[in-house]
Amino acid sequence: MPEVRDHDIREKFRRSGYTLTSQRRAVLEALSEARGHPSAEDVYLVVKRKNPRVALGTVYQALSVLEEIGVIESKHWSESPTRYDLNLAPHLDIRCVRCGDVAEVPGVEMDGVEERIQANTPYEVTRTAMLIEGLCPKCAGERNGA
Amino acid sequence: MPEVRDHDIREKFRRSGYTLTSQRRAVLEALSEARGHPSAEDVYLVVKRKNPRVALGTVYQALSVLEEIGVIESKHWSESPTRYDLNLAPHLDIRCVRCGDVAEVPGVEMDGVEERIQANTPYEVTRTAMLIEGLCPKCAGERNGA
DNA sequence: GACTCAATCAATAACCATTCCTGAAACGGA
DNA sequence: TCCGTTTCAGGAATGGTTATTGATTGAGTC
Ligand SMILES: [Mn+2]
Ligand SMILES: [Mn+2]
Ligand SMILES: [Zn+2]
Ligand SMILES: [Zn+2]
C-alpha cells in the first residue's frame, strides 16, 4: 500500500506543480500515523516529535496544499476543528460530541441524493455533505455507568 | 400567522422559565423581518435600527436562548457564520458560496437516512444534517456573463 | 408604591481555530 | 555560481463567538 500511495502522491504533486517538501511529507506521514481523523493540531503534535522546528502555520499550509491536489480530504463539524482524512472514497464519518473521536460509517449509500437536490433547487449544487454526530460506545457507556 | 406563533412562543418561554424580554422579542421580530436566513450580525443590524443601544453580545445571547427553547433553529456552514431559521420543519437549505444567500430546497425526502446510519455504527446517533453548497442563479449568471 | 433578590443586560475582554504577513532560507534552471 | 521564484518559520492579525463583570431591570410581595 505505501508504495502505491507514494507513487500516486508523487504523481499528484508533479501534476499540480507543487513541490513535495520534507514538511509536506512529514505532514502526510503524521496523518497516516495518527490513525483516525486528526485535526491540524493533532498533526502538528506528531510532526513536531520528529522535527520540533516545524511551526503550526506550516502544518496548516501543508494540509491546505495536500487537500488542494487531492491527496487528503477535510471534514468539518461545527463546534470542532477541521478533521483530515486519507480515505478519499465517498463515505460517512460520525463524530462523538463528548470526546471528539471520529469513526467511519460503512454501508450507507447516499447515491442519488445530490441529483435529487439539484432537481429541486435553481441553485447550481457544488457540494453536499452529511454531517453526523453522536456518542461513541465508550462515552455512551460512561454516561450510563455514571 | 403572527397570532398563532406569538401564542406558541409565549408558551415556550413560560415552560422554559426564561422571560420574554423586549430584546428577545426584538431579535425574534428582526429574524422574521430579515426574510431568509440571517446571521447573528444581520439580526444585530436590524435590531439596532430600532434600538441602537443593544449590543451584539446580547443578540448572541438571545439567539442562543431562542434556539434552546425551540423557537428558532441554527444551521452551520463551514467558512460562514451561523445562520438562523424560523422554519422548524425538517428541510434542506442551500448556501451560495459566492454571495452567501441561503435558500430552502423543497421536495427532497431524507426519511430513513438517520435510521440507516444508526444501523451501521456502534455510535449512538444524536444528530444528522445535510450540508449543501452551490451557486445561486444570480451568481451563476454573473459568472457566465463575465 | 417601595422592597427584595434573582434574572438579565450592555460593554468589553478573552478565546480559539485559522489565515495572513514578513523577512529569511531553499530550490531550480541558465 | 547567480538569479528569480517558492517555500518556510515565526509571529501577528482576524473574525465569529463566548465569558466576565458590574449595573439595571422586573416579577412577586407587602
Ligand atoms: Mn473518514
Ligand atoms: Mn431554512
Ligand atoms: Zn466519545
Ligand atoms: Zn449567490
Image: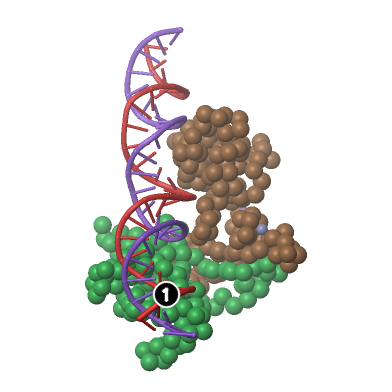
Chain colours: A green, B brown, C purple, D red
Identify the chain of the residue marked 1, using the numbered disc in the image: A
Q: Which residue is mark 1?
A: A85
Residue name at image x 61 percent, y 32 percent: B49
Image coordinates of residue D5 in percent, x first then y, are 48, 73
Question: How many numbered circles does the render carry?
Answer: 1
Quarter of the picture containing the N terminus of chain A is bottom left
| Left or right of B49 in this view: D18 | left
Image coordinates of residue B55 in percent, x first then y, are 49, 34
Q: In the image, is the residue at mark 1 within 8 Å of ligand 1 by its beta carbon?
A: yes
- The single residue placed furthest to the right in the displayed view is B145
* Residue A50, visible in the rendered structure: yes
Tell me the crowding category of disc 1: few under 14, some 14 to 19, or many 20 or more residues within 10 angstroms, Cα based: some
Quarter of the picture containing the C terminus of chain A is bottom left
* Residue B121, visible in the rendered structure: no
Query: Where ligand 4 lies, by image quadrant?
Result: bottom right
Front one among A18 and B47: A18
Front one among A113 and B115: A113
Task: From this view, report whether residue B67 is shown above or below residue B21.
Answer: below
Task: From this view, report whether residue B28 is shown above or below residue D24.
Answer: below
Identify the image quadrant of residue A79.
Answer: bottom left
Image coordinates of residue B83 in percent, x first then y, are 55, 51
Task: From this view, report whether residue D21 is shown above or below residue B80.
Answer: above
Residue name at image x 45 percent, y 58 percent: A78
Image coordinates of residue C15 in percent, x first then y, are 33, 49
Element assignment for label 1: strand
Identify the image quadrant of residue B52.
Answer: top right
| Left or right of A121 in this view: A73 | left
Residue name at image x 56 percent, y 48 percent: B39
Residue name at image x 30 percent, y 69 percent: A54
Going by the numbered disc 1, the residue's amino acid type is: Asp
